[in-house]
Amino acid sequence: MSGVIERTTAPVAAREAAERAREYLLSLQHEEGWWKGELETNVTMDAEDLMLRRFLGILDERTLAESARWIRSCQREDGTWANFHGGPADLSTTVEAYVALRMAGDPLGSEHLRRAREYILAHGGIEATRVFTRIWLALFGEWSWDELPVLPPELVLLPDWFPLNIYDWACWARQTVVPLTVVGAARPCRALGVSVRELRTGRPRPEPASLLTWAGAFQRLDDVLHVLERVPVKPLRGVALARAERWILDRQEADGGWGGIQPPWVYSILALNLRGYGTDHPVLRKALDGLDGFTIREHTPEGWVRRLEACQSPVWDTALAIIALLDAGLPPDDPALVRATDWVLREEIRSDGDWSVRRPGLTPSGWAFEFANDHYPDTDDTAEVVLGLSRVRHPEPARLGEVLDRAVAWTTGMQSRDGGWGAFDADNTRTLPEKLPFCDFGAVIDPPSADVTAHIVEMLAARGEADGRPARRGVRWLLRHQERDGSWFGRWGANHVYGTGAVVPALVACGIPVTHPAIRRAVGWLTRHQNPDGGWGEDLRSYVDPGWAGRGESTASQTAWALLALLAAGERGEPVVRGVEWLTRTQREDGGWDEPWFTGTGFPGDFYINYHLYRLVFPLTALGRYVEVTSDETTG
């Protein structure tokens, strides 16, 4: 009897929850038409910002105190820092946070630093940290440049067909590697103001891997490069450094940054400073001023805190908000949607970027993730923008249609040879960069992924092109890449719940019947991984430990992803009802949801994101679609 009551009341509760969420989302719209939630990451952003400012000689006491206060607030009871809420301790993050607090004057004998230091030394010390952490320490003489992998600036002179040329790297890695070749060639050493040598264990360098492996071969190559770095005359060094400098300057964005993300931004500042650009130079002044736009200051009981966003996501957030509001029944000509559409249309990118190296002649279009990132539009943002704007009733339909047609043509032109889509580049699949000793952190190539390919396939279906060759090739790619357990891997969201939540609606939209074995396996995987409380969650540790796949605390965004897949697959039974009931039961009075867990992915296994708007747009989308299908069935 209780099941009958739940099935009867669930649509009513869902409708009321969707209405509250819709009004709350509308209240968050900027007057210019866009939405943007905070993009929360980890304290390496703040620690590295302090080290950057110390290196440049511009670190002021207020910035140091406020950032240190934030870093302290994120330390856990065991003395460590993690890369995501509730995650395991991360050695490199803990070392960088420790360095920042020592810079802020925290005494060596303080209890919180003692606990951090004990963890660091027990887990290998500075010697065991990632390359990026040791680069930051080398800038201040706290690590030897001789003990870091060599990235020669001559790399930028390699033609784009040659192995290990800069376009073999993903765009985010490419934008980081080029300035780091300048930094590594300069081998600077400036004053940190403190020493952190207490974090060294003195352990010897590990023995190199077998020469018969890629890792071993590249380690020997790195030894050769170290020898060459000591040769006083390098015929191409000056040309290479000038080329790298020009490459960096050409890619500075309107907001002063590079790529709209923290790593290339800070390393480009370092590189240009080492090339003679002072902090009063217009290029660096613009870059440093731009970082202020990525800074959040808040007043807490302990005082003001300052933290830095690694990136900002207004285009992505706005596209998802448009889709959510439409699914929640907002009229397609509502002024809020028209304002959002006008803003998005102004953000279309009409210039060539790095993507054109692999796709010369393709007419530029598409959207980037950020306010300013014209060199790097991405197919994922573009797909979601087209999905949303295709449903808006705009007062200038011809203008809107022209932009959408151009965006679809650009996106289909970015399809890789195997039928899938990467996010920023086509055919960015050469794995050699992954073998370099430098690459011990994060994804460094951008191969096709299930979630991006699914979003594009779904977009093509929405534009009436489900039977076209690009969509058919995309569908075949998705079917080939289903995991044995029935799920799909989520590259840009956590993880198998995200991938499966994206792929199932896309396949159904392209005409794959809900009875298809791939759909049934996906439904089975989702229902098996529903939590006892009715929600879904997946811990980010699933990227390194398959035993975590589909396991984790229930979250609003991940519950919504699972529901989107189940609803698209025609499911209306107990798992769906329980999932909807979890969303309605956990909704806040203001219409939103609490979600401290990170469900976004930057680099699988290493860098994760808590998109603060995910906890609202995805539940609203799922509730809206549930209300729609249950209303249709009741009417029918």
Image (cartoon, grey):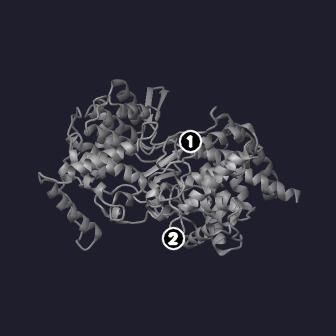
- Residue 60 is left or right of residue 341, and the answer is left
- Residue 174 is left or right of residue 25, and the answer is left
Quadrant position of residue 504 = bottom right
Residue drawn at the location 65% of the way across and 52% of the way down: 404
Residue drawn at the location 32% of the way across and 36% of the way down: 52
Q: Position of residue 382 (x, y in %)?
A: 58, 52
Q: CA distance from mark 2 to mark 1?
A: 31 Å
Towards the viewer: 172 or 623: 172
Q: Position of residue 343 (x, y in %)?
A: 62, 39
Tag 2 residue: 418
Q: Is residue 126 visible?
A: no
Tag 1 residue: 314
For the residues labelled 2 and 1, say whether their Cβ atoms are less than 8 Å apart. Answer: no
- State the SS at label 1: helix
Q: Position of residue 413 (x, y in %)?
A: 55, 61
Residue drawn at the location 55% of the way across and 63% of the way down: 450
Answer few, some or many: residues within 10 Å of disc 2's Cα (few below 14, many 20 plus, some between 14 and 19): few
- Residue 630 is left or right of residue 556, and the answer is right
Q: Position of residue 316 (x, y in %)?
A: 57, 47
Kind of residue indicated by mark 1:
Pro
Q: Is residue 614 visible?
A: yes
Towards the viewer: 319 or 283: 283
Towards the viewer: 119 or 268: 268
Kind of residue indicated by mark 2:
Asp
Residue depth check, mark 2 versus mark 1: number of the one nearer the observer: 2
Q: Tag 1 or tag 2, which sits nearer the N-term?
A: 1
Q: Quadrant of the C terminus?
A: bottom right
